[in-house]
């Protein structure tokens, strides 16, 4: 019989298609960072499948295999193979889970014409003691109006879920933004609840970027964040840092 879980370790991490802060491809480094963080659930953004820029590999499969975790992938963008004749190129985000993922849904989000498509991926993780809905997304970086529309669509989709819910990802919104505030009125912000009181900067570029910001977030309902930190283990592995939260189960 599986032991009832009282705490979940949750990570959100924009992995920059496996390229480090200097732009050097190193997916193995991403896997090593995640291995160090020991997540029960990890939500990753900017994940490639079969792109030449990332060695043509199936990154979701490589990471799931390296970490021994269950995985689901949502391609927000699909393009013909390059060169022709191979599998389509896909780019999106994924969920990694210590437990099987069930009732998987891939929901397109509204976006402006000509802009990169956006997606909500959510599933039920079969956590011992009770299932948890896990949702990941990556919102539009350019338009606050688009992000607000995307958040409204997410809010419509997620209330139908029973039990605890985790929403995490690169929301491209700093504290105080309208779309983030809309979510915070309905869910608890892990950093606000369990952070160390620091800035919590997750987008850091190459380490000298003047636009460093807290734009990656973990939000919950039906769970309590007991601690949250920006994981220094990931510094330099991407242009973002991982955000790690420990969440207490009901």
Image (cartoon, rainbow, N blue to C red):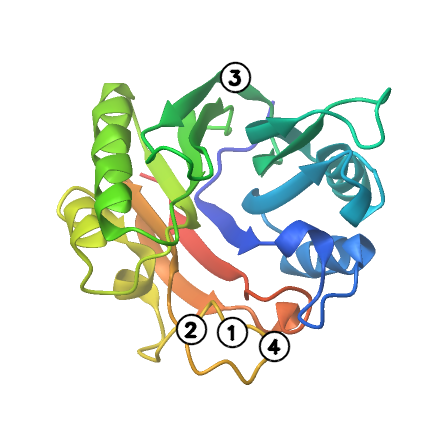
Across and down, in percent, residue 96 comes to 61, 37
Q: Which quarter of the rendering shows the N terminus?
A: top right
Across and down, in percent, residue 164 comes to 32, 33
Residue depicted at 31% across the width and 78% down the height: 197
Mark 3 touches mark 2? (CB < 8 Å): no
Vertical arrangement, residue 204 with respect to residue 81, above or below? below
Residue at mark 2: 201
Secondary structure of residue under mark 4: loop
Residue at mark 1: 204
Residue at mark 4: 206
Q: Nearer the viewer, residue 164 or 207?
A: 207
Mark 1 touches mark 2? (CB < 8 Å): yes
In the rendered image, which quarter is residue 210 located in? bottom left
Q: What mark, if any, has residue 102 been given in the picture?
A: 3
Secondary structure of residue under mark 2: loop
Across and down, in percent, residue 148 comes to 22, 43
The numbered mark, 3 or 4, whose residue comes first in the sequence reads 3
Q: Is residue 65 left or right of residue 37?
A: right
Q: Nearer the viewer, residue 120 or 117?
A: 117
Q: Nearer the viewer, mark 4 or mark 2?
A: 4
Vertical arrangement, residue 76 with respect to residue 85, above or below? below
């Amino acid at each position: 019989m599986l032991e009832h879980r009282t705490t979940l370790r949750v990570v959100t991490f924009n992995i920059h298609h496996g390229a480090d802060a200097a732009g050097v491809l190193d997916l193995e480094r991403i896997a090593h960072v995640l291995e160090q963080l020991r997540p029960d659930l990890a939500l990753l953004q900017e994940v490639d499948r079969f792109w030449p820029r990332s060695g043509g590999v199936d990154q979701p499969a490589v990471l799931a295999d390296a970490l021994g975790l269950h995985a689901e992938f949502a391609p927000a963008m699909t393009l013909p193979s390059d060169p022709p004749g191979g599998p389509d190129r896909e780019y999106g985000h994924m969920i990694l889970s210590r437990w099987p993922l069930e009732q998987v849904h891939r929901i397109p989000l509204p976006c402006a014409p000509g802009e990169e498509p956006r997606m909500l991926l959510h599933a039920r993780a079969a956590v011992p003691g009770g299932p948890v809905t896990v949702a990941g997304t990556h919102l539009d970086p350019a338009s606050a109006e688009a992000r607000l529309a995307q958040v409204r669509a997410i809010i419509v989709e997620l209330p139908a879920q029973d039990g605890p819910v985790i929403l995490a990802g690169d929301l491209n919104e700093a504290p105080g933004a309208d779309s983030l505030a809309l979510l915070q009125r309905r869910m608890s912000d892990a950093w606000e609840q369990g952070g160390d009181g620091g800035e919590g900067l997750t987008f850091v570029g190459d380490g000298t970027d003047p636009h460093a910001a807290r734009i990656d977030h973990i939000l919950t309902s039906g769970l309590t964040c007991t601690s949250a930190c920006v994981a220094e283990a990931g510094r330099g592995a991407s242009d973002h840092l991982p955000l790690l939260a420990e969440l207490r189960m009901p």
